[in-house]
Structures are given as structure tokens and as C-alpha cells.
Amino acid sequence: MSTEGDYDCIVIGAGVQGSFTAYQLAKKKQRTLLLEQFVLPHTRGSSHGQTRIIRKAYDQDYYTVMMEECYRLWAQLEEEASVKLVRQTGLLVMGPENSLQYQVVKNTLQKNRVPMVILPPEEFSKHIPNVNLSEGDGALVDTTAGVLFADRALRAVQGQFLKLGGIIKDGQKVSDIKPGALVTVMVSGGVYRAKNLVLTAGSWTNGMLSYIGLQLPLKVLKINVCYWKEKVPGSYNVQQRFPAFLQVECPEGKHHIYGLPSNEYPGLMKVCYHTGSETHPDMRDRQSDRSDIDILKRYLTRCFPGLDPEPAVVESCMYTVTPDEDFVLDCHPIHNNIVIGAGFSGHGFKFGPLIGKLLCELSLGEVPSYDLSPFRIRRFPEHLKPSL
Ligand SMILES: Cc1cc2nc3c(=O)[nH]c(=O)nc-3n(C[C@H](O)[C@H](O)[C@H](O)COP(=O)(O)OP(=O)(O)OC[C@H]3O[C@@H](n4cnc5c(N)ncnc54)[C@H](O)[C@@H]3O)c2cc1C
Ligand SMILES: O=C(O)[C@@H]1CCCCN1
């Protein structure tokens, strides 16, 4: 077994969160190694695919407030890497006017003075053709929102990290971690040591945490990423300025339904259900539950009459979900040179640049730029005691 040189920091997992963390560390002159189990780029985790939603429309103020800086950081990366990563399309939010869900999003936007437009039902179809607003639903558009070009963003941030002198080793699966003043990380055929470790292993987080005496209440869900054919090509197209959308409540299912304008596959619009069935991350393709697709078919038949209600393409992705759907951004409760970023619960991509900054701050022992109390590990006390 060879022993390779020491680093200031090792980051495990080159998804969006690990890649931005490594980039921030390299910016702060830390000698940083980014380790990834699969050969890059890959489609086995949570960060692949061409698009994600970026938005300020959130239930909680703290996410809306954090997004302010995220937009700036995305623009900064666009400039540094000379690449377009964000396309402003707006996000149409629909839900029963009197429901808590809809009202909370509306209030958060208003309170935080986020530019938005409320669409009264009688004017809805003038602004949003080809969509049937449900009886009793309210509709608003978060005009700051849009589409993030996800694969391109990952390539850009990894490229900038390499330019700063960072090292990426892909195809290297971490098989053990030994905590200490120097953390030791084992991969097949090698050992790496560093003063600090950041763990951003996505759906594999609990597997990694088992090496260091910790388990978090994380559920791994397989998401069926469905693309639906436009009956008239272009009717829900990004070029026609069709927005992304979020249906916060509807009779077809308990969870949100969301969509992005057709873009990556010409003539196909991405519409998904915000939950899926549990899986082990290595067994994703054996999970074959498609009950979410039935919910989507019924919803689209009713509300998106311009789409063929049979998915033309179904891809897979994974969510790693905490019980409250808030992230985990914290130091290990005993080994404080190990930082954990996990549980992004299907909404973490847009925060990537800021998550990177915050995990870097935690790793360097700096005071984090935001109040991280919603993201602490000790909000799950029952999970801390037995495993430590
Ligand atoms: C269908 C879908 C739609 C989504 N939509 C949105 C959206 O619209 N907007 C939004 O903001 N977010 C969205 N998200 C969420 C967002 O994509 C995720 O929160 C984010 O990608 C999580 O990134 P990550 O880096 O934590 O995980 P990952 O991308 O999975 O990265 C973790 C990495 O760690 C590696 N790893 C694990 N174990 C090891 C090991 N032993 N050794 C070495 N490497 C290892 C993995 O291979 C992987 O590459 C969506 C997610 C999905 C699945
Ligand atoms: O993070 C987002 O913006 C979307 C919203 C709907 C569910 C999936 N994630």
C-alpha cells in the first residue's frame, strides 16, 4: 500500500457540494484533494443531468435570504469560467389560494421583497398559455427564478478548482476513514492523510459516517426523472420564456410536482414528483416503483393539456432526505477537523456555491457567514447517543 503526500484538506465526493467546497478551499490556498468513487463525469449520484431550478421562493426566510448571495456567487463563477450557467425564466408557483403551503411561500417572498408577480385567475391564461390553473388555486411568479445548467456548472467549478492547483482523483472509492490530528483516508491501493476532512458523499453519507462513529437520519430516495412530449413542439419551451413551475398542493398526490421548460431534449418538458421510493444508493436501478409516474400522468392530463401524458424518457436521480428536509452542515460532534455536508433533500443544487463557502469556513474553524442552527447535527439527538 502506498502512502501519498499530505494535504491540508481532503474532500470526499465530487458532486456539486464537494466540488464547490474543494474550489473554496483552493481559493483559500489550502492544498486540497477531491476524491470521487466513480470516473467523472458520472450519473450515479444526485448532481447529474442538464438542469435544476434556481429560485428564491421558499417557505423559510433563511433559504430565501441565503439565495441572495447564491445568485451573486453563481454569477461570479459564470464570469470566472466564461460560461453561462443560469437562465432566468421565472418560477410559476401554484397551489390552493387558502392553503398554508401557498400562503407561506407568498409571505416569504413579500417579506423579503423578492420581485414577483401575482397572477389573478382571470388573467392567468393570458400570461401562461397551455396550463389549466386548478379551481381555487392561486398563482404567482418568482421572477428571479430560472434554470441552472447543472452538468455544465459541475464541469465549470471542477475546472476552476484544477486551475487553482487543486487535485481531483476519480475512480477512487474511499473504503475507510481513521480520525485523528491527521485524518487518514483509505482507498483501494492507497492512503491519503490531511489535517482536515470534508465529507460530501451524498446518498453514501451514512456508509462513510459508519467509519467515524456517527449515523444520521437520512433516507435515500430514487427519483424518476420524467420527460414529457409537447403535442405542439415549442409550447412549453425555454425560448418562448415558459417558466419553471412548482405545484405545492394538488388532489393527485401529497407531494410537490415541479417542472422545467423544455430545453435539454428538444420537444420534451421535464416534470417530476418531489418524492420517490427508498433505495440503497448502489441498488438504485433495482428500485422499480413507478407509482409517482401515475400521479404525474393524472396531474398532467388535467393541468398540462399540451403534453402527451405518457413519459417519453425516464431517467434516475437520488435524493438524500432529512426528516425536516433541512440540510446538515456541521462538524463531527467529536472529531472537529471532520466537517459534514449532507441531506440536501432534493433542493441543494442552487445553494452549491454557498454550501461550498460554508463548509470551507467550518473546515478552517472560521465563524460561518450564516446562522447554521437549522443545519446542526444535534437537532437529531436520538441519533447521536447510540452511535457515539
Ligand atoms: C431529480 C432531482 C431533481 C432535483 N432538482 C433540484 C432543483 O431543481 N434545484 C435544486 O437546487 N436542487 C435540486 N435537486 C437536488 C440537488 O441536485 C442535490 O441536492 C445535489 O445534487 C446534492 O449534491 P451532493 O454533492 O450532496 O451529492 P452527489 O452529487 O451525489 O455527490 C456525492 C458524491 O460522493 C461520491 N462518493 C460517495 N461515496 C464515496 C466514496 N466512498 N468514495 C469516493 N466518493 C464517494 C459519489 O459518487 C458522488 O459523486 C434535485 C435532485 C434530483 C435527484
Ligand atoms: O429545489 C428545487 O427548486 C426543486 C423544487 C421542487 C422539488 C425539487 N427541487
Image (cartoon, rainbow, N blue to C red):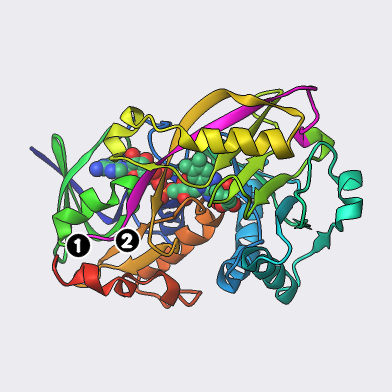
Which callout, 2 or 1, points at the residue further toward the start of the chain?
1
Q: Is residue 191 or residue 117 the one in the foreground?
A: 117
Q: Is residue 332 or residue 4 the one in the foreground?
A: 332
Within the magenta stretch, is there residue 228?
Answer: yes
Kindly identify the amino acid type of the residue bearing the numbered disc 1.
Leu
Q: Position of residue 242 (x, y in %)?
A: 78, 40
Kindly identify the amino acid type of the residue bearing the numbered disc 2.
Ile
Instruction: Evaluate if marks 2 and 1 touch, with contact meaning CB atoms under 8 Å apart.
Output: yes
Q: Position of residue 2 (x, y in %)?
A: 11, 39
What label does residue 272 carry, if any? none
Within the magenta stretch, is there residue 139?
Answer: no
Residue at 60% over, 29% down: 227
The magenta span reads 215-238
| Disc number lying in front (2 or 1) | 1
Q: Mark 1 near ligand 1 (CB under 8 Å)?
A: no
Residue that mark 2 sits on: 340
Residue at 86% over, 54% down: 121
